[in-house]
Amino acid sequence: MYKGSDMKKILLLGDSISMGYREYVKDSLKPYFEVVYPYENGKFAAHVYRMLYEWCSELNVNADNTALIYWNCGLWDVVRVFGDEPQTPIEVYKYYLRNIEKRLKK
């Protein structure tokens, strides 16, 4: 178990679904990890990608202090408003998912 400033972080990133469970995860893992997340809804994959730098800076998340990143986004991307095609075309969605993954690995 980590103590004080040696405690590793878990970063939760996600859309509105993650907003429903993040406090539970934080409370459940409190003795073992510092669970952090942006208070903002991640919404679309493009938004998550755009905000990664700011969120990681604000939350002081880096490769040295972070044990795990749990990330989900997509509900906003695949919504079909009025029965139309998904809000985000699948190729665009895949583009952002790949770029999010690359950025998180850094």
Image: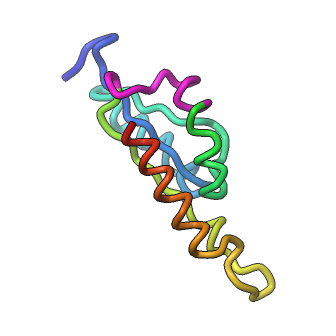
The image shows a total of numbered marks equal to 0
Q: Is residue 32 above or below residue 82?
A: above
Q: Residue furthest right?
A: 82
Tell which of 91 and 37 is nearer to you: 91
Residue at 49% in and 50% down: 100
Coloration of the structure image = rainbow
Tell which of 25 and 44 is nearer to you: 44
- Which image quadrant for residue 32? top left
* Image quadrant in which the C terminus is located: top left
Image x and y of residue 68, in percent = 33, 39
Compared across the picture, whether 58 is left or right of 34 comes to right
Residue at 60% in and 57% down: 45
Q: Is residue 40 above or below residue 86?
A: above
Residue at 40% in and 26% down: 62
* Image quadrant in which the N terminus is located: top left
Magenta extent: 54-65
Tell which of 79 and 2 is nearer to you: 79
